[in-house]
């Protein structure tokens, strides 16, 4: 069984109440939930939240939900807590970020199929970097991969570093992949993640995926072409609404 879990934290520091923010008339959590339900290959979709308000919204849209502790520090922790609380008998767990209102269901389906067809512990999407300015943005996480797209390392620095060449020319000398923060786990891998303590590399980069990578788990990076726009702060809502308006047929 494949279960998609959408961690939805109401008490966001930068955007309190974010899952319930209205985007073109729908709450953000409703948009993410509907997109996830439209993905093929998923048997069950659960919203994991610490908030009764988000739980009420889940009931309004007839979505399954699980109440989790407000003390959990990450979406991955919230997903793992839901796995345990609901005693899910699943072989695959999708961690679907609750702040991706433009999520394309095909991405989730691809992550599931790629995991099932490989020996990876985790599949995660990446998109090719085409703008050199992104290489100097610490909010853009890049990943170095093998020729078979197995992750070697994730970093907030651009990797690889092209020695002796100005950064403006790096895209001409190497391929760069931006990491997109969605994860499709074998259930044992996500449960292993929460058993392990944060590592020195994870703390230095502030990238939780390094914890499992250092533990020897195999990440398969899945190239996509769809650009997602996460909602981190209130002003991002207007950006998403503008994109939705542009995509509507005349």
Image (cartoon, rainbow, N blue to C red):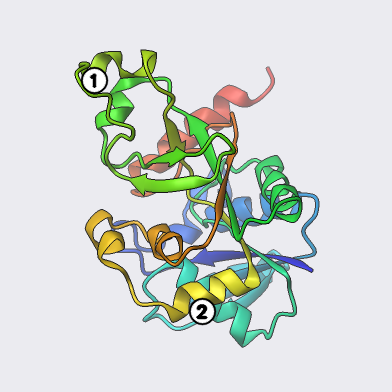
In the displayed structure, would residue 173 be above or below residue 181?
above
Camera-nearest residue between 225 and 218: 218
Q: Is disc 1 placed on a helix, strand or loop?
A: helix
- Indicate which disc residue 52 carries: 2
Q: Position of 69 compared to 2: left or right?
A: left
Which percent across, then down, holds residue 111? 67, 48
Quadrant of image for the C terminus: top right
Residue 100 rendering spot, x and y as whole percentages? 52, 48
Residue holding disc 1:
167
Gap between marks 1 and 2 measured at Cα = 48 Å
Q: Quick check: 50 left or right of 191?
A: left
Q: How many marks on residues?
A: 2
Q: Nearer the viewer, residue 95 or 92?
A: 92
Residue 53 in sight here = no
From the top left corner, tell me how far across and down residue 151 is, in percent. 48, 46
At 44% from the left edge and 24% from the top edge, which residue is drawn? 175
Q: In x, y percent, where is residue 72?
A: 40, 77
Asked which secondary structure carries label 2, the reply is helix
Relative to the observer, which residue lies in front, 172 or 245?
A: 172
């Amino acid at each position: 069984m494949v279960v998609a879990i959408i961690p939805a934290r109401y008490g966001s520091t930068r955007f309190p109440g974010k899952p319930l923010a209205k985007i073109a008339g729908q709450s953000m959590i409703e948009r993410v939930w509907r997109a996830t339900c439209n993905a093929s290959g998923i048997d069950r979709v659960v919203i994991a939240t610490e908030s009764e308000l988000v739980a009420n919204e889940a009931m309004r849209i007839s979505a399954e939900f699980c109440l989790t502790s407000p003390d959990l520090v990450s979406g991955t922790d919230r997903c793992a807590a839901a796995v345990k609380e609901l005693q899910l008998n699943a072989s695959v767990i999708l961690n679907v970020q609750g702040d991706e209102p433009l999520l394309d269901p095909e991405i989730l389906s691809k992550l599931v199929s790629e995991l099932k067809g490989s020996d990876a512990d985790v599949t995660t999407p990446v998109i090719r970097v085409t703008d050199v300015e992104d290489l100097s943005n610490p909010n853009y996480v890049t990943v170095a991969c093998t020729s078979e797209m197995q992750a070697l390392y994730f970093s907030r620095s651009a990797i690889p570093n092209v020695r002796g060449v100005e950064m403006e020319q790096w895209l001409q000398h190497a391929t760069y992949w931006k990491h997109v923060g969605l994860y499709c786990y074998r259930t044992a891998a996500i449960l292993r993640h929460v058993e392990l303590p944060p590592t020195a590399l994870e703390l230095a980069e502030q990238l939780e995926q390094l914890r499992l990578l250092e533990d020897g788990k195999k990440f398969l990076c899945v190239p996509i072409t769809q650009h997602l726009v996460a909602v981190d702060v209130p002003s991002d809502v207007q950006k998403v609404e503008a994109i939705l308006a542009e995509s509507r047929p005349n």
